[in-house]
Image (spheres, grey):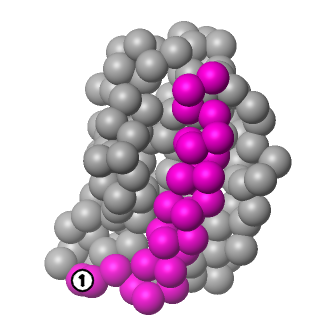
């Protein structure tokens, strides 16, 4: 599993992206939901429209923006990979129509923050299906690791 201990220093903002009605596609939104109560000023559930959260993200004045989204990058279900906008460019990584690489570049331009995507390999995005055990486990692991980053850096 991915280790976030090397996450760049400074104020971390987390943005979950996904559709909870489509099984594993809800991974990013579920991560945000689990973190939001404890970190309401630096965690956003952008659901299927991350571009609508540009202003609140900018107001949070982040040094690092971590996007969490389900993806299909050919990995094992529940596998998590970190990616930059350059890594995402030209690849059909996300399960959404809007190009995530473009949003990542806009975030970097608008905030000056380092922007990274934590892509969770989806097994199914069937409407109405339950999230798979592998992706649920990945969500739990990401929540734990992101809590460590947020506890250590959100007030800097």
The image quadrant of residue 89 is: top right
The answer to whether 34 is drawn above or below residue 77 in the figure is above
Which SS class for mark 1?
Answer: loop
Judge whether residue 96 can be spotted in this image.
no
Position of residue 59 in the picture relative to residue 65 (left or right):
left
**x then y, percent, for residue 155:** 56, 26
Q: Is residue 58 magenta?
A: no
Of the 4 image quadrants, the one containing the C terminus is: top right
The answer to whether 32 is drawn above or below residue 13 in the figure is below
Position of residue 7 in the picture relative to residue 105 (left or right):
right
Q: Residues within 10 Å of mark 1 (few under 14, many from 20)?
A: few
The answer to whether 101 is drawn above or below residue 119 in the figure is above
Judge whether residue 127 can be spotted in this image.
yes
Residue drawn at x 27%, y 70% as measured from the top left: 22
Q: Is residue 133 magenta?
A: yes
Q: Main secondary structure of the magenta part?
A: helix
Question: Residues in magenta?
Answer: 129-156
Q: Using the image as rendered, state which of residue 73 and residue 32 is in the foreground.
A: 32
Position of residue 107 in the picture relative to residue 89 (left or right):
left
Of the 4 image quadrants, the one containing the N terminus is: bottom right
Residue farthest bottom in this picture: 133
| Residue carrying label 1 | 129
**x then y, percent, for residue 124:** 40, 80
How many numbered marks are there? 1
């Amino acid at each position: 599993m991915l280790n976030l201990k090397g996450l760049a220093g400074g104020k971390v903002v987390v943005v979950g992206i996904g559709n909870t009605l489509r099984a594993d596609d809800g991974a990013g939104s579920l991560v945000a939901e689990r973190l939001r109560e404890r970190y309401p000023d630096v965690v956003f559930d952008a659901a299927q429209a991350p571009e609508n959260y540009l202003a609140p993200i900018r107001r949070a004045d982040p040094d690092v923006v971590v996007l969490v989204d389900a993806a299909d990058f050919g990995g094992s279900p529940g596998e998590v990979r970190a990616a930059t906008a350059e890594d995402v460019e030209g690849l059909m990584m996300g399960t959404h129509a809007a190009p995530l690489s473009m949003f990542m570049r806009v975030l970097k331009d608008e905030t000056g923050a380092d922007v990274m995507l934590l892509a969770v390999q989806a097994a199914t995005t069937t409407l109405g299906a339950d999230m798979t055990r592998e992706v649920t486990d990945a969500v739990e692991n990401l929540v734990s690791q992101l809590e460590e980053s947020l506890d250590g850096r959100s007030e800097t």
